Image: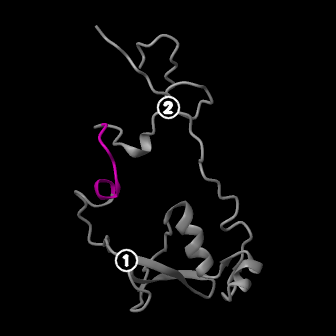
Amino acid sequence: MRQFPGVNVPIDGAGGQNGLFWFTTSMDPVKFERSYARTGHWDGLNRDNYHLLTGTKVAKVIVEDGTAVGVQIHPRDETENRSVIKARKEVILAAGAIHTPQVLQLSGIGPKDLLEEASIDVLVDLPGVGMNFQDHHYIPGVSFSCECS
C-alpha cells in the first residue's frame, strides 16, 4: 500500500489521520498471523496456576465483605449445576465490552435503579457500569479494482 500515491500509512490507527488502518489486535505483531484466544492464552503456556475451562460461563462475581473473592460458574448450555471457584489472591474480570458489565450487573454492581428493576440485590451502586456502550456501526472501507498488464 505504501507504493500507491497519496495513500498515507500511519504507524498506528490512533493518529487521527485518514489513510490505511490495520488492526494489530487481530494478528500476531511479530509473525503477522491471525491471533486468537488459543494462541494468546493457551498454546505454549505451562503454569500450575492457570486453568482454562472451556464451555463454561461466569454467572456472577462472588463478593464477601466488599471484596471479590471468586466467581460462580456453570456450563455454557445450562444455568443449573453452578459451582464456585475461589481466588487465592485476586479476581480479574475480563469478559469483553458486553459481558463484563453484564457479569458485574448480575453480581449486584451497577446502576441501583436498573439492578432493583431486575430484582438483583445492590452491592455497589455504580451508575457507569454498562452505560455509554457504543457499537462501531460504521468503519469506511475502500476496494480497489486493478487491471495489471
Colour scheme of the rendered structure: one colour
- The amino acid at mark 1 is Thr
The label on residue 56 is 1
Q: Is residue 145 magenta?
A: no
Residue located at (49% from left, 26% from top)? 20
Dividing the image into 4 quarters, which one contains the C terminus? top left
Amino acid type, label 2:
Phe
Q: Which residue is mark 2?
A: 21
Q: Please tell me in which quadrant of the rendered image residue 113 appears.
A: bottom right
Residue 73 appears at what percent x and percent y? 43, 83
- Above or below, comparing residue 20 to residue 77 in the picture: above
What is the span of residues highlighted in magenta in the rendered image?
32-40
In which quadrant is the N terminus drawn?
top left
Q: Measured from the top left, where is residue 11 in percent x and y? A: 49, 27
> Which mark, by number, is residue 78?
none
User: In terms of secondary structure, where does tag 2 sit?
Assistant: loop
Label 1: which secondary element: strand
Q: Measuring 60% from the left and 69% from the top, which residue is drawn there? A: 101
In this rendered view, identify the residue nearer to me: 8 or 138. 138
Image side of residue 106 versus residue 32, left or right? right
Give the spatial CA distance, label 2 vs label 1: 35 Å
